[in-house]
Image (cartoon, rainbow, N blue to C red):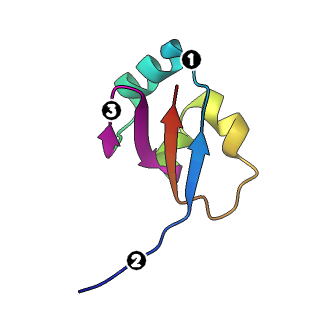
Amino acid sequence: MKVAVYKTVYVTGATCELMDKVRRTVNSWAEGEGNICMTFENALEVAELHELLKSIKDGGDVILSL
């Protein structure tokens, strides 16, 4: 067996419009009713998220939630 620990960035307070945009345009690896999980690189493709994330080094996965 193998264990891995990853850094995760949580972005909370997203609007419904942003959640819909991300669902339509970004390749996420998981999503639920109130959250979307994606790689850091995929999150940077969304202009609204890019502004929030651009200064983070070694971002890991991103969880976007309402």
Compute the Cα span from label 2 to label 3.
23 Å
28 relative to 63 in the view: left or right: left
Q: Secondary structure at mark 3?
A: loop
Task: Check disc 2: other Cα within 10 Å, few if <14, some if 14-19, many if 20+.
Answer: few
Q: What residue is drawn where x is 35% and y is 41%?
A: 28
Rendered position, 56 above or below 13: below
Compute the Cα span from label 3 to label 1.
15 Å
The range drawn in magenta is 29-40
Viewer-closest of 47 and 5: 5
Furthest toward the bottom, the residue is: 1
Rendered position, 7 above or below 66: below
What amino acid type is highlighted by mark number 2? Ala
* Residue located beneath label 2 in the image: 4
Please tell me which of labels 3 and 1 falls first in the chain: 1
Tell me if residue 46 is in the magenta stretch.
no
* Residue located beneath label 3 in the image: 32
